[in-house]
Image (tube, helix red, strand yellow):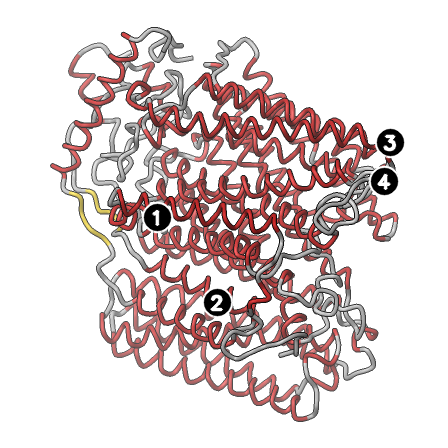
Amino acid sequence: MVNVQGPWSPLLGRLSLGAIPDNPIIAGAFIFSVLLGILVLVYLTYADRWGYLWREWLTTVDHKKIGVMYIIIGLVMLFRGFIDALMMRTQQVLADGAHSPGFLGAAHGYLVPYHFDQVYSAHGTIMILFAATPILVGLMNVVVPLQIGARDMAFPYLNALGLWLTAVGAALVMLSLFLGDFSHAGWVGLTPLTELAYSPGVGTDYWMWAIQISSVGTTLGAANLIATIVKMRAPGMSWGRLPIFTWTALSTNIIALTSFPVLGVALGLLGLDRYFGTHFFTAGLGGNLMLYSDLFWIWGHPEVYFVILPAFGMMSEIIPTFSEKPLFGYVTMVAASFAIAGVSWSVWLHHFFTMGASPRVNTFFSVATMVVGIPTGVKVFNWAFTVYRGRSRFDTPMMWAIGALFMLLVGGLTGMMLAMPPVNYSVHNSVFVVAHFHTMLMVVVYGILGAVSYWFPKVFGFRLNEALGKRFFWSFTIGTIVVFIPMYTSGFMGMTRRLDYLTNPALMPFEIAEEIGIGFYLVSIYYFVRQLYVSLRDRNANRVGADAWGSARTLEWLAPSPVPFYNFAVTPRVHARDELVWRRGQGLEGAAPPRYEDIPMPRNTSVPLAIGALALGLGFGLVWRIWWLTDVSFIAIILTVIARSFVRDTDYVVKAGEVEGIEKRLRQRAAEAARAATSASGIDALRPRESNP
Amino acid sequence: MITASGDMESARSGLWEPHYHHDVIATRTLGFWLYMLSDAMIFAGLFAAYGVLSHTYNTAGGPGLHALVHPWTAYAETLAVFASVLAYGGVMVALKRGNRAGVLLGLVAAFVLGAVFVGLEVHEFAALFRMGIYPQGSGYLSAFFALVMTHGIHMAFGLLWMATMFFQVAAQGFTDKTVYRLLNLKLFWHFQAILWVLVYTFVDMRGVL
């Protein structure tokens, strides 16, 4: 163990009252969080929901509920990451030129450099690992078992464990806001800046352990999803009939399973440097700084495709549904997904062309990067040909999918530019790069928001408000355009990234435009929250049957909406790639199983939650070097796992009669909803639809 | 199109697959293979780091590979780990015959031999520490200790798992759960032996040649 600067006590480690930051912005955030927390606690107590919360959510092993909790964590963190973005944009618009004013102790703007550095590090870490990743994992959790006709994931207990480990990572990031600080070394954690000598505080440790713990959860989740897709498919669901979203989930989880361990190694070795004084990435004594960059990006680039492939899958589900046509080029779509997943492993060096590898090395990685454009181009044309001569309807999910297509076009073409080392040399570390990867991540965000509105009725049984959804889409899209076009431009004008102060006043107009754009994002958040509120309030008017869109194609729309906890009362037999379209063509769309049967289901368990709580103790102890806490938590985790392995009674049986009752009730409610839909004007749930193509 | 009502009925029954169940043990085994793939990537990362950090300048003037490895100790460790795998093979034979006492006996033998391996490794590291060779000495030493110790820690966890399985099989006999765990432990133990072969080849042998 290395000695750290400052006081340390055996009981509290490095933790002391001095760890509480004295900054009015953080104090405001703290008061906001505490009030929100108190409000939730009061509601839970007042409405007597504690038992419900514990039984139905915290101890659940139901893949849909776990998925929903993943998505909630992701949306909360998305909001937090957005606030970071708002702070950065406001700082840059204030701190522009030598005469710009300074507030709150900053020479320019209102954030001191060290605080600004933490804000952008937190923004990156949160958006990639605690917003995009959990939401995508959550959506895959909800949709994949339904699409393949399974009752649950292959390992429901492991699934819950993955969720709680992800929650621990998010919790550590949030804790760092109010207790200590966060990393100031960028979300990539540049060495040797992250070494103890240059970052002696707890910020880097928060960053490191939050990622490390949550990525264990992601790796477990990836193994689970792959095993589910390979082993749990319904009879007749051959590889050639697998829905595209499930295919992309498979390819993306192969990436996750193989790349996240490398991140674990990179951060683990950095941890050894910081805690034991080894010399993996130190500037002296035989350390190698480049080794970190390589290991990090060997994970980092596959991770980029880990987040984008499911978004491609979502677009591939939404576009055929709202074009009322089968997806164009199913086989090439699958091949393209796996080509992208494969090439993702051979492009990592394009993140540091300028670091001085030989021209030959740079050429290899440049060509490999451009090769990515081929399968991606195939996908874009497939989507375009799917829409071509289709019966297009522009419901909110379709709007998001089309928006994602445009983002992909802009992001992909600027990516082609950056793939060329000569161009890369001139725009390296400029905000042009920042604008490029934000446009690409916007593909993911658009895909996610489309998927959330698309599959929402499947999980909850009612549709989200359409008018507010459109307003959400347009305000968000205007925000995207107004933020990122000026960002591309100022990048070309030479503005470098991560600046807390701009020396060139000529950049001011772009900064103002971006600030206006972020205002549109703020408006879009208002519409999103309002959409959720209004939809929940009017849920009885927006109930849907099994097929929420009237033209859905894949197996998940065969199950009732909301999906009962056992998914399908009797496992369906699959006859076609678009099973629902096939059944519709045969006139068997609403056919109920001839008889019901007993269903064995996994029992709820509080063990994953307990392991999560212990992992939080472990992470917190490691950050603050409270050794008794780390030891106790670590040993307790191992003992809990062993003790759980002795439990034999982990499953139970749902009786056939009970299943029949639930199914009857759901059918009745769906029929009522359909009647209500036809009588109410303006809602066209029963519009005419295509026959079997 | 299906028109006659009788055909309709048969088509409907063809839409569902009553009493459809998945093979628990096969699913668990696949899941474990997937876990091992991720574990293999951890070792790939560590081997890569070891390769990068094994230039002469990474030793920072400190001891290099030749000063670290003891071929005969490593050979003895190899024998111990292979014998342990063989003993675990005995567990598998006994499991196939449904012989609980044989499984327990095999687990004890595999555990003891695995413990010999871990003991020899601890002994080896203690000797290095006595000579003043620590992971903190240089980038090279950091990579060497990280690689070999990660394997050692995996072995130690394998022993913990074996001990757990001993008591579980003794208490519960052969259930779905205990059987798939025994099968997965077999995979894990063989995997660690293969990793040891790689460590032996790329670390110890290179130090001798």
Look at the numbered disc 3 and give the secondary structure of its residue. Answer: helix
* Kind of residue indicated by mark 2: Leu
Query: Can I make out residue A636 in this image?
Result: yes
The residue singled out by tag 2 in the image is A618
Q: Do the numbered discs 1 and 3 sit on residues whose CB atoms are within 8 Å?
A: no
The disc placed on residue A506 is 3
Q: Secondary structure at mark 4?
A: loop
Residue holding disc 4: A99
Specify few, some or many for label 2: CA neighbours under 10 Å numbering under 14, 14-19, or 20 or more. Answer: many
- Mark 4 touches mark 1? (CB < 8 Å): no
Image spot of residue B37 (x, y percent): 53, 57
User: Which residue sits at x=74%, y=29%?
Assistant: A512
Q: Name the chain letter of the residue that bears numbered label 1.
A: A
Q: Is residue A297 visible?
A: no
Depth check, front residue: A316 or A631: A631
**Disc with the residue nearer the chain's start (4 vs 1):** 1
Which of the image's four quarters has the N terminus of chain A?
A: bottom right
Nearest to N terminus: mark 1 or mark 2: 1
Question: Is circle 4 on the same chain as circle 2?
Answer: yes
The amino acid type found where label 4 is placed reads His
- Could you say whether the residue bearing mark 1 is in a helix, strand or loop? helix
Residue A362, percent from left and from top: 83, 46
Residue placed farthest to the left in the image?
Answer: A657
Dots 3, 2 in contact, CB < 8 A:
no
**Label 2 element class:** helix
Q: Which residue is mark 1?
A: A41
Amino acid type of disc 3? Answer: Ala
Q: Earlier in the sequence, mark 1 or mark 3?
A: 1
Image location (x, y in percent) of residue B105: 31, 81
Establish if A367 lies above or below A318. below
> In the image, A124: left or right of A663?
right
Q: Chain of mark 3?
A: A
